[in-house]
Amino acid sequence: MSQIIPPPFKIEFPEQIALSDQIAGNRSDVAASEKAVSLVNNKVSNLAKVHSGTETPTSDVGKDGDVFYVY
């Protein structure tokens, strides 16, 4: 008994999506490149740490109730 193997099918995308290294702005037709994702990750990791209400803030950080903010 032989098996019938169907031919490969083609997947078509209706729109072209370009890659972009830009991390600013608002564009819906562009995907982030690996470089852009890396830039955002670096910027996020360099942000000040968020403190909970039970921790003492470090210098240059003020307290307003339970909300900590950076000067």
Image (tube, grey):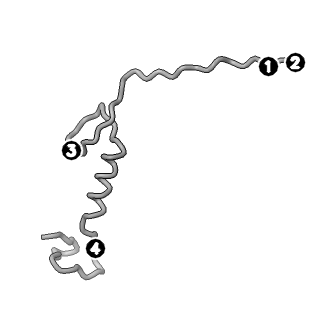
Q: Residue furthest right?
A: 1
The span from disc 1 to disc 4 (Cα, nearest Å) is: 64 Å
Q: Is residue 8 above or below residue 35?
A: above
Q: Could you tell me residue 39's position as x and y percent?
A: 29, 52
Q: State the residue at coordinates (27%, 69%).
A: 50
Which amino acid is tagged 3? Ala
Q: Nearer the viewer, residue 52 or 18?
A: 18
Which amino acid is tagged 2? Met
Q: Quadrant of the C terminus?
A: bottom left
Mark identifier at residue 50? none
Q: Is residue 12 above or below residue 24?
A: above
Q: State the residue at coordinates (33%, 46%).
A: 35
The span from disc 3 to disc 2 (Cα, nearest Å) is: 60 Å
Sequence-wise, the earlier of marks 4 and 2 is: 2
Secondary structure beneath disc 1?
loop
Check disc 1: other Cα within 10 Å, few if <14, some if 14-19, many if 20+. few
The span from disc 1 to disc 2 (Cα, nearest Å) is: 7 Å
Q: State the residue at coordinates (25%, 45%).
A: 23
Q: Could you tell me residue 54's position as x and y percent?
A: 30, 80
Sequence-wise, the earlier of marks 3 and 1 is: 1
Mark identifier at residue 3? 1
The span from disc 4 to disc 2 (Cα, nearest Å) is: 69 Å
Identify the residue position indicated by label 2 in the image.
Answer: 1
Sequence-wise, the earlier of marks 1 and 4 is: 1
Mark identifier at residue 51? 4
Q: Could you tell me residue 49's position as x and y percent?
A: 28, 70
Answer whether labels 1 and 2 touch (C-beta < 8 Å): yes
Identify the residue position indicated by label 3 in the image.
Answer: 24
Q: Residue furthest bottom?
A: 56
